[in-house]
Amino acid sequence: MRARYIFFILLAIAAPFFIYPTFLMKVLCFALFATAFNLLLGFGGLLSFGHAAFFGGAAYICATVVQQWGLTPELGILAGALYALVLGAIFGWIAVRRAGIYFAMITLALSQLIFFLALQLPFTGGEEGIQGVPRGRLFGVLDLSDNLAMYFFVLTVCAAGFWLIHRTIHSPFGHALTAIRENEPRAISLGYDVSRYKLLAFILSATVAGVAGALKSLVFQLATLTDVHWHMSGQVVLMTIVGGLGTIFGPAVGALTIVSLENQLADRVGSWVTVIMGAIFVLCVMLFRRG
């Protein structure tokens, strides 16, 4: 297992010298987003249709902190993460009291509230979003306008996020969360506070998703309504299922697959790309349950 991790790290370090760094950064951001979502769905058994609120909302917060307040990028990412943590605690406190389709619909409804706020609040720029977000200087020293410097910064943050999720999954908390997913009544009978475990998993998933969204706003130097739209929540579900629920590297592979297909097919088939993605989703659900 350690050899596999070393291989992936070396591959990631060498990749920007052979592949366009901006594409790789997009893959990394969505891989982190999907990995965070997988903690909730793959290991907690909770299907959320509201994760765009954390991803996109953090993108807006980070863009505002960096562009309008003039603060450094690391503070922008921290602000986005704190926003996602607080919002995740609020959403989770409301939603984890329900299960199944009711949980999913509550998260979707709450997420739509954030979309409405992003559309109406003056600092978000409405339909135009926040554009021209400066990447700035990391800790006031490292110029992130250089694509290679930005790539290695994104890689470092994403690697830390992957490590956090990995440690969580393999911790006693992660094992308890899996037990709750497999047999909730039995977990309750053993004395586990099921609602508390679900809430903590929701908050952690939301926070890491917020970090991914904040990074994405710096990479592309904008935050738009697309980031908070419910389609974004559906896209991360697709990435996770394509890669494989309840796996370590599956969501990252799913993100790489979906982002690559979108980039390759967008210019060739136009709007038909959504039909193709839908067909891939159906095939994965029917034939490849583990991704």
Image (spheres, helix red, strand yellow):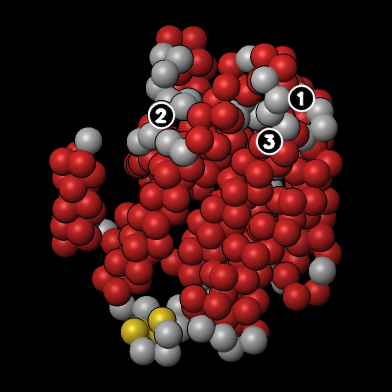
Residue displayed at 72% across by 21% down: 188
How far from the left and from the top, in percent, is residue 100?
A: 74, 22
In the rendered image, which quarter contains the N terminus? top left
Viewer can see residue 31: no
Q: Which mark is residue 99?
A: 1
Residue situated furthest top in the rendering = 287
How far from the left and from the top, in percent, is residue 152?
A: 30, 67
C-alpha span from label 3 to label 2: 19 Å
Q: Nearer the viewer, mark 1 or mark 3?
A: 3
Residue displayed at 40% across by 62% down: 157
Q: Nearer the viewer, mark 3 or mark 2?
A: 3
**Quarter where residue 179 is shown:** top right
Viewer can see residue 167: yes
Three-letter amino acid code of the residue under disc 1: Ala
How far from the left and from the top, in percent, is residue 156?
A: 34, 63
Three-letter amino acid code of the residue under disc 2: Thr
In the rendered image, which quarter contains the C terminus? top left
Read off the residue under disc 2: 247
From the viewer's side, name the closer residue of 6 and 20. Answer: 6
* Image position of 111 with respect to 224: above or below: above
How far from the left and from the top, in percent, is residue 138?
A: 41, 81
Residue situated furthest front in the rendering = 191
